[in-house]
Image: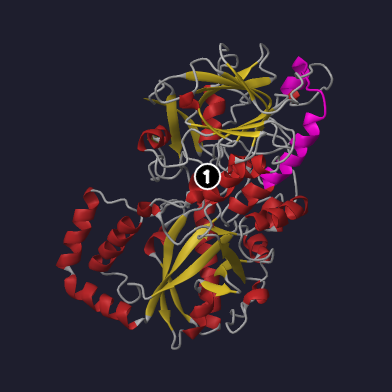
Amino acid sequence: MFVDLRSHDLGVTIDADIAIVGAGAAGISLAQTFLGTRTRVCLIESGDVAHSREVQELAAGENAGQPYFTLDTCRFRRFGGSLNGWPAALRHAGTVIAPMTPIDFSVRPWVPESGWPIQVETLEPYYAHAQSMFRTGPWNYAPEAYEGDRHFQPFDPDLLVTTIWQSISDFNWGEHWGASFRCAPNITVLTNATVLDILTDGTAQVAQGVRVATLVGDAATVRARLVVLAAGGIENARLLLLSNDRMKAGLGNHHDVVGRYFMEHPHTFTASLAFYGDRHWLSAYKDFQVNGSGLRAGIATSEAAQRKLSILNHSAIVVDRFLAAGYRESGGYLAAKELIMQLVTRRLNRSSFAHLATMFRDLPTVMRGVKEHRAGRTGALYTRSEQSPNPDSRVTLSNQRDRFGLPRAKLSWRLSSLDKVTVRKSVQLIAQEFERLRLGRVTPDRWLVEDDHTWPEFVRGGYHHLGTTRMGSNPRTSVVNSDCRVHGLANLYVAGSSVFPTGSHVNPTLTITALALRLAQHLKAELNRPMRMMTGSELRAGGVRRNVWAAPAANNLPTAVHGGGA
């Protein structure tokens, strides 16, 4: 059932077995596994079913590193989160899903802090289940399963491979699962309830619930045996840092790891392409359908090449009919390209006028480029690459305050030399294979070959916020363990892409869902065990000692709601 916190009296207390903070992909995936059970779930959402500008403003924050989207336009406070579909101003080609590959989970000596405490085999059954939740194609991402009348290129498998994404553009996550939750007596979706902090016992070893409030300031408490943060890669870290009543540095932050290792997937144009003759081969690398399922094919760097060249995972798509080849040294062309990127990423600024003026000064060259563009003889490579874990790329608390008086998030997105070297070497592989197969001449963009540190103004991410509460076995370099439990707390968990130790090159949605389904199995087992406290040494080591503190029984339905609590 849906409950609007604004309809309750001040000081209401809600009791549940599990409190889940955030009703996006992770939170909903987790909650739906308890449909029809006797487990009382409270799914807490800052927004409502419909978009609210006032609530969305709570997502605003500060950018202090690599230029990035404004923080209130790349994450959404409403039931269903980003999977409801992006607002028109930000809607691009739609949401796609794909699983991560085995190398993404492995320790890679050339990638600092790489390696998951679980392997891809651990997630495979959950991946298959997650796939079925999206109402898309079958659990099959082998390119040969989708060739049909189209033909993928015979790339050297030691260099490049064709990679497949499946589209979920037409599936509204919020509408679908909202209908299921409305008639579920054991699941309370608490809307218009912004979590202010996480409540713990006097030792900060046991989470007791969360404190929530409406925009008008009416406060309430949700008490639960198990608490799960599923509010996204930026907000999960912010909530842990804000919860500093008993732990000055924030919960789970004994070693200053919370908020660190923020990762994205750098998205940018990287090279121009001049086609050699017939371009019919390119139809296999555009959006297409097989048996009603939407698909997209791209070009990825093979695992063998990643190991040989000591680079990260990388993929690219070919964009044809693009103002590109032949005019690379033209100031007018370069200005036109910069302006196009600013328009695509909605980042117009003062420099846009300068670019426009430069275009007009070099208009004949720009017009010749437009002619080439219309003739379909040119194209470009558009990159989506993995970012290496970087402790200096992080989320902290800003000096800016939200309407509750709480510090906003401050994002310092930092890209490294390995990130750029990965893109350069991968583009070189594509150029080598395109030449061998006589597909076209690839010319890397100037920014890509100049040095190992400079990135273009128009590089952006994919709205993928990864790594700020990373998973690992060592509390000194991670925030949660392999079960997604926060080190040092008996019953506080994190769901979502913030637990990713590394991010691959693929969209994180399918892996987010698979991890949430795996976490659900663990929580079901935990509910059948007594809760536990920890000794000081166990707290420092992130260990667990059972049978010391027993949570109150919580078997009565529906969720208890009563007033007077704090």
383 over 43 or under it: above or below: below
User: Can residue 476 be spotted in the picture?
Assistant: no
SS at mark 1 in the image: loop
Type of amino acid under label 1: Gly
Magenta-colored stretch includes residue 532: yes
Quadrant placement of the N terminus:
top right
Q: What segment carries the magenta color?
A: 515-540
Q: Position of residue 60 (x, y in %)?
A: 39, 35
Q: Position of residue 65 (x, y in %)?
A: 41, 40
Front residue (pair 338, 198): 198
358 over 351 or under it: above or below: below
Q: Position of residue 478 (x, y in %)?
A: 66, 34
143 over 477 or under it: above or below: below
Quadrant placement of the C terminus:
top right
Front residue (pair 550, 559): 559
User: Can residue 341 be spotted in the picture?
Assistant: yes
88 over 482 or under it: above or below: below
Magenta-colored stretch includes residue 78: no
Label the magenta part by its dominant secondary structure. Answer: helix
Q: Position of residue 427 (x, y in %)?
A: 50, 67
The residue tagged 1 is 80
Task: Name the residue at 50% across, 26% down.
Answer: 5
